[in-house]
Image: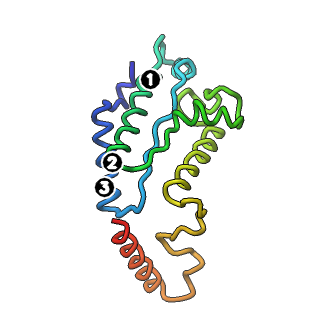
Amino acid sequence: MHSARQHVPVALYIENLRAIVLHLRTVAHARHVILITPPPLDEQARLSHVQAQGIHTLQPDRTYELTAAYRDACKDTADLLKVPCFDVHEWFLKTGASRGLYDASWRSLLSDGLHLNEQGNLELYEGLMAVLDQHVLQGKGTEAYPHDLPWHSDFGKANTKQIIHAYRKQLEENCTSSV
């Protein structure tokens, strides 16, 4: 069972991920790309949510098994494209619970069985920062990482066009040196 209106077949999902990474690398000149898997899905909570919307069904619109297939596809695509991947599914199931940041149930991180609630977003942030630190910042902290755009406080000190031109030049140099 899947949500027919929003369903994207796994093969097309993989194709889309590849296109996004290629676009970010070649057109947007992104220095770093990190793929993020979907979180696990709580079928019972999802079913309750769908039924509360007035939809009379005995099946959830999504399944844990299918969501896990997208997770695997994301991880495999990241491996193939040699980009880091933050496995939210794994983080929620194992890492978060073992760190004792919330009750042992990963279900407590989802608002409707599918979407993250406030605590889920905090967990996502913690895990993503760990991946970012490992693969991009390398323990130096965000302060040491160069910015792509000027700080707002830089404006007003000099000609705005000069500031933008200098930052664009810096960005181009950073992109060519990271290719």
Which circle's residue, 3 or 2, is located before the other in the chain? 3
| Residue 172 drawn at (x, y percent) | 36, 74
Q: Amino acid at mark 2?
A: Leu
What is the distance, in whole Å, between disc 3 and disc 1 at their CAs? 29 Å
Query: Quick one: which residue is furthest to the top in this view?
Result: 58
Asked where in the image residue 100 lies, by quadrant, the reply is top right
Left or right: where does residue 26 sit relative to residue 90? left
Q: Dots 3 and 2: beta carbons under 8 Å?
A: no
Front residue of this view, candidates 94 and 115:
94
Q: Secondary structure at mark 2?
A: helix
At x 39%, y 50%, the residue is 83
Q: Dots 2 and 1: beta carbons under 8 Å?
A: no
Front residue of this view, candidates 44 and 29:
29
Q: Which residue is mark 2?
A: 81
Left or right: where does residue 43 sit relative to residue 25? right
What is the distance, in whole Å, between disc 3 and disc 2 at their CAs? 13 Å
Q: Amino acid at mark 1?
A: Arg
User: Which quadrant is the C terminus positioned in?
Assistant: bottom left
Q: Which residue is mark 1?
A: 62
Q: Which residue is mark 3?
A: 23
| Residue 122 drawn at (x, y percent) | 64, 44
